[in-house]
Amino acid sequence: MFDVFKKKEEKDPVCGMIASEKFISKYGEKFCSESCVKKYEVENHIANEKECGGSCARGCC
Ligand SMILES: [Zn+2]
């Protein structure tokens, strides 16, 4: 959609940290830690119901 605004530099979509080589690549994004991966999964309804554990802010489970 907004490809014009896409930058080469990748950021953690959860906390906004600039990606480094230590970052975890998942879902086409880069994450600084497993906890950010988890948050991303919850926010995007990727986590399965058991892992979500009722903490989903959007009420998917
Ligand atoms: Zn992060």
Image (cartoon, grey):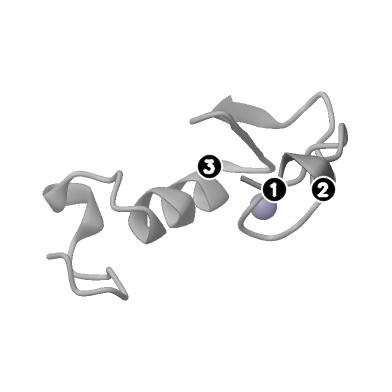
- Determine the CA span between mark 1 and mark 2: 6 Å
The residue carrying pointer 1 sits among few (fewer than 14), some (14 to 19) or many (20 or more) residues within 10 Å by Cα, namely: few
Q: Amino acid at mark 1?
A: Phe
For mark 1, what is the residue? 2
Left or right of 23? Residue 55 is left
Give the number of the disc on residue 31.
Answer: none
The amino acid on which the numbered mark 2 sits, given as a three-letter code, is Phe
Q: Secondary structure at mark 2?
A: helix
Q: Are marks 2 and 3 in contact (CB under 8 Å)?
A: no
Q: Position of residue 11 (x, y in %)?
A: 76, 45
Q: How many marks?
A: 3
Label 1 to label 3: alpha-carbon separation? 28 Å
Q: Quarter-wise, where is residue 23 in the image?
A: top right
Q: Nearer the viewer, mark 2 or mark 3?
A: 2
Confirm or deny contact between disc 1 and disc 2 (CB under 8 A). Answer: yes
Residue holding disc 2: 5
Which corner quadrant holds the C terminus?
Answer: bottom left
Q: Residue at x 49, y 31 (%)?
A: 27
Instruction: Answer with left or right where residue 1 lies relative to residue 26.
Output: right
In the depicted structure, whether residue 61 falls above or below residue 47: below
- SS for tag 1? loop
Q: Residue at x 69, y 60 (%)?
A: 15
